[in-house]
Image: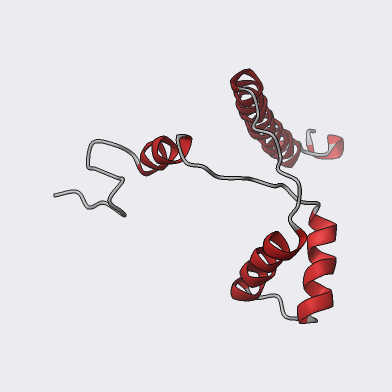
Amino acid sequence: MPTTCCTSCTPSRSHTAAHAARLANAAVTVSCGDPQRNKNYRAALFGGKKSDPVEAREAARFALTERPTPTPPMEQELRTLRQVASRMQDASDVAWKACLVATHSAFENLQPAHMLG
């Protein structure tokens, strides 16, 4: 019998789809911050500590005390475009790596001219 990770998931629904459906109607405010600003904020409050619990505490504290402006939701068309672009980039990376491997193999198989006879 398939197991589920939470009450939103069922054996017939994937984890991502179940959570996306649940979050679609949730009253959530999302704010995307500048990574360097977040890093500086954490360093100012917690020094050199960089564990996941410290970073989670820092993010929660920042959200509660600084009240960053919400990031507007992305339009469906733009989300789709970003997904397509990401997949194209992944495919390009795979093709580039395959080309490098093939070129490297071809060069390894070449023999110097003086050995060809």
Closer to the camera in the image, 28 or 9: 28
Closer to the camera in the image, 57 or 51: 57
Residue 76, image x, y percentages? 59, 22
For this orientation, the residue located farthest to the left is 1
Number of numbered discs on residues: 0
Residue appearing at x 34%, y 39% in the figure: 14
Closer to the camera in the image, 12 or 89: 12
- On screen, residue 72 versus residue 4, left or right, reads right
**Vertical comparison of 94 with 27: above or below:** above
Closer to the camera in the image, 56 or 28: 28
Residue 47, image x, y percentages? 80, 81
For the C terminus, give its image quadrant.
top right
Q: Quadrant of residue 86?
A: top right
- On screen, residue 73 versus residue 69, left or right, reads left
Residue appearing at x 77%, y 71% in the figure: 42
Residue 98, image x, y percentages? 65, 33
Residue appearing at x 19%, y 48% in the figure: 2
**Vertical comparison of 52 with 98: above or below:** below
**Vertical comparison of 62 with 35: above or below:** below
Q: Quadrant of residue 20?
A: top left
For this orientation, the residue located farthest to the top is 77
